[in-house]
Amino acid sequence: MAEIRRDPFSGSVVIYSPDRENRPDFTGIKRTIDLSPENCPFCKGNEDMTPPEIFRISDGDSGWKVRVIPNKFPVLNVEENYNRSDNGIFERFAGAGAHEIIIETPSHSEDIALCAPDYFSDIFITYRDRINDLKNDFRLKYIQIFKNHKASAGATISHHHSQLIALPFVPEEVARKLVVLKNFYKKNNRSLFSNIITAELEHKERVVSENESFIAVAPWYSRTPFQVSFYQKQGHPRFEDVRDQEVENLSEIFSKVIKKIISALGDISYNLVLYNLPFAEQDDAGFNWYVELLPAIGGTGGFEAATGTYINTVLPEKAAEILNKF
């Protein structure tokens, strides 16, 4: 039986259609990436195969735990001069920005299901420090950090890595969410995040994990099967201001949840997305930074592309029930 739910952040809707889970797959497409440590540019010892690094977290000796490099094939270039022009209804501006690769480990075949929370702490600290560095560039308005794990989630290299794209504009989807959040805060004198967290903790049926600082839930408006959102219990708007203790708590809950997902579903493809406040926005916008983990199950098609409406085959309550067995 299909069910329609509305995303309280954007107003978009998600259609749940469990019957579609049993569709046959005749694609026969091989979705693996064949790359060995000898020819992988992200492996330890192959540093000369990448552009010069921008940032690193050292392993305490002469090596590294995390490296950041410019993307060799950037979406946007930090060297571009920012300028814009209009031709009637057509607006044009140069692609000034930045595109960086966060290499999360020197090991080619890191099994993150076995990694301690400290592994994830180094990655989140790198996110924080790169945002703080890039926000000094007046041309940049928003930074999107994301991870594509495995080919069907958009990865072109199998070695664990994230990406950062710094934009000279605020994406429309982010702007729409901010309008919703501001209006809710103005009307209720309380953030939408607070209401959602209170409701989730009261009912518990979608809670996957929690600790003193964070709650991980299979959200009511899940766009993909087994989506998990990580919310702060005491919300702050800017990830670049996150304290070390909060990073530790985020890493602890993220480590638990990723292990649950791998135990339940195997080493699946997924996307990781960090949502943050645009630089020019005031801190009282009713926004809290948060993280989403989106397993790439089922894929999207023409209907989703045309309407912005997602079709999901697994209700979030069922997803939470399954994950909480692990």
Image (cartoon, rainbow, N blue to C red):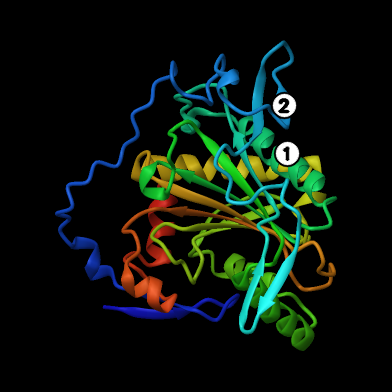
The quarter of the image holding the C terminus is top left
Task: Please provide percent x and percent y for residue 305.
Answer: 39, 71
> As shown in the figure, which amino acid type bears the numbered disc 1?
Ile
Nearer-the-camera pick, 325 or 47: 47
Asked if the residue at tag 2 contacts the one at tag 1, i.e. Cβ–Cβ closer than 8 Å, the answer is yes
Q: Residue at x 48, y 50 (%)?
A: 271
Q: Is residue 177 above or below residue 98?
A: below
Foreground pick, 160 / 111: 160
- Provide the residue designation for mark 2: 57
Residue 318 x, y percent position in the rendering: 37, 62
Where does the image place residue 20, in percent across and percent down from the top left? Answer: 23, 67
Residue 125: mark in rendering? 1
Residue 232 visible within the image: no
Q: Dot 2: what SS?
A: strand
The image shows residue 93 at horizontal and vertical percentages of 68, 65
Cα gap from disc 1 to disc 2, whole angstroms:
9 Å
**Residue 3 quadrant:** bottom left
The image quarter in which residue 245 lies: top right
Q: Amino acid at mark 2?
A: Ile
- Could you say which quadrant of the image residue 281 lies in? bottom right
Kindly give the residue lying farthest to the top in the view shown.
61
Is residue 179 shown above or below 115?
A: below
Residue 202 horizontal side relative to residue 259, left or right: right
